[in-house]
Amino acid sequence: MKPLVTTARILVGALFIFSGLVKLNDPMGFGFKLEDYFAADVLNLPFLTPYALGLAIFIVTIEIVLGVMLLIGLKVRFTLYALLAMIVFFTFLTFYSAYYNKVTDCGCFGDAIPLTPWQSFTKDVILLVLIVFLIVYRHLIQPIASSAVLISITAASALISLFTARHVLRHLPFIDFRPYAVGKSIVEGMKTAEELGLESPKYLTIYTLRHSESGKIVEVNSDDYIAERWWEKEDWEIVTDKTRSVKVKDGYEPPIHDFKLMLGDMDITDEVLSADKVLLVVMYDIHKSDFRNFTRINQLAEYAESKGAKVFGLTGSSSTDFEPIRHEVQAAFPWATCDMTTLKTMVRSNPGLMVLERGTVKAMFSHWDTPSPQKAENMGLF
């Protein structure tokens, strides 16, 4: 039995550490995923949204620390019950997402390994079984060193996790798994399945219908709704807030969508993607932006324009909210609007900088790492 316990212990501990490390590479992205879960139409916990980033860092740190504690054998009973509590919560969350089709990617392994809700639920159920197995046979788990050494290792893992989170939030992820990573072509990422000669996925709309007299509820997909002429049945009405979309056939989906830049009433997407050099200053939400380095951003923008590059700011905030701030930070270049989720995906900094060369991402910076004109010249950015 002990070899099985050791194997399960290594699998569970290593998986929790791996899961934590992958999310630690991009804690802001995991924070955005938590915001999706806190939304009114999912868990309806909007009061937690302002704390999403802090919770993200706390969760990934706990994942790593508990994984380390299990592997080294520190406070085994506490560790296993803490892991059990976490996996029960995650199992509920992934089942809820899968059954109600609310959050299509749990964020378990960040952008590195996207999982569907049902895949995530299956993973959590397997982990749940393994953790329960370890709880039953926890007497077979022995520490690998003295208590002082184990506590030092655990404390070090926690401190390293927190330091890494701070570093990434200040300087962008170590490894970028997103479709806007340096070297990726936004133009290629936007191509549809039809343009690439591939098959598209198929989605069906699921309607919830209620009988006006009996109150009976039935669910009908959009194909059957049309084929069976449900719209002619006067006693049945659609419950609009229960309508949802379900994927019934896999296919190619472009990794980049909703990349549409509007300058007032003018669509400048093609202009930006076809230009030789473009500097984009991205602020997805003006209310959450850090303006301490905007003087350096303005200096870089002036230098880029002097070299013939186009410069645009991008924001998801309304012009009413944005205009007073734009004047305050003296951002004289034109500002276009874009979908806020797209801007969050583009660069994990608010504000953040992206340099494009004919639609391909040439460089990306956190506002803390805004290069000086001299450094930009040495890097050959413009």
Image (spheres, grey):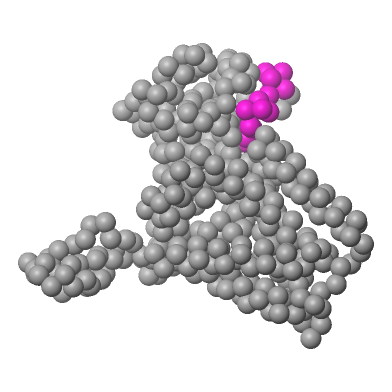
Q: Which residues are magenta?
A: 362-376
Q: Quadrant of the N terminus?
A: bottom right
Picture layout, residue 82 above or below residue 216: above
Residue drawn at x 67%, y 18% is 373
Q: Nearer the viewer, residue 90 or 141?
A: 141
Picture layout, residue 49 above or below residue 319: below
Residue that protrudes farthest toward the bottom in the picture: 1
Q: Is residue 178 visible?
A: no
Q: Nearer the viewer, residue 154 or 223?
A: 154
| x and y, in percent, of residue 136 in the image | 71, 79
Residue drawn at x 80%, y 77% is 139
| x and y, in percent, of residue 310 in the image | 51, 23
Which quadrant holds residue 264? top left
| x and y, in percent, of residue 314 in the image | 47, 30
| x and y, in percent, of residue 36 in the image | 46, 50
Does the magenta segment cover residue 139?
Answer: no
Picture layout, residue 11 above or below residue 253: below
